[in-house]
Image (cartoon, helix red, strand yellow):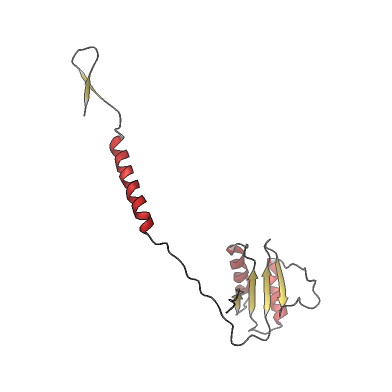
Amino acid sequence: MPAMQSRSGSGRRRTINEINMVPFIDVMLVLLIIFMVSAPLMTPGVVDLPTIGQAQRQPDRVIEVIVDADGQLRLKVDGRTPAGSDPDERVAMGRLAARVKALAEGAAQVPVIIAADKGVRYELVVKVMDTLQRAGVARVGLAVRTTGG
């Protein structure tokens, strides 16, 4: 360790109790340069999502659960509001399974499509799917936007 001679001139030496930061800064600057040079060479991981075409056969009856941007749930059967219901009627999450089962009228294979707004959190969509699957709805799917070709 480096030592300094005291000012009194007595010949006693004392040690310097400071951390030398210069080697640390040198290493950090070298790492920074390495990352700056190698960053443009890295290719970003691009996920190529599949597109969906037209289904061969459309089901006879479809129940649609619509999740609005504000998280409210509405139901449609074959693209229309169920008979005897208000078009703006909201369905609570706790009553969703019972309403879907009533609209299915006992048919086990009626598909239920979840049409969620683009701004809805995934957590809510997963909660709707889980609620339907726990209630015994066998066919639960997600609505997608089809390509123009």
- Disc tally is 0
Q: Nearer the viewer, residue 80 or 95?
A: 80
Q: Quadrant of residue 84?
A: bottom right
Residue drawn at x 71%, y 73% is: 75
x and y, in percent, of residue 31 in the image: 32, 47
The image position of residue 137, as x and y in percent, is 62, 78
Quadrant hosting residue 92: bottom right
Please tell me whether residue 90 is drawn above or below residue 8 in the rendered image: below
Residue 114 location (% of width, % of height): 63, 72
Instruction: Judge by depth and name the residue closer to the eye, 98 or 129.
Output: 129
Identified at 70% across, 74% down, the residue is 98
- Assign the N terminus to one quadrant of the image: top left
**Residue 50 x %, y %:** 51, 74
- Give the quadrant of residue 74: bottom right
Left or right side of 66 for 7: left
Which quadrant does the C terminus fall into? Answer: bottom right
Residue occupying the far left of the picture: 11
Q: Residue at x 32, y 39 (%)?
A: 25
31 over 130 or under it: above or below: above
Side of 55 relative to 67 (left or right)? left
Position of 38 with respect to 9 (left or right) is right
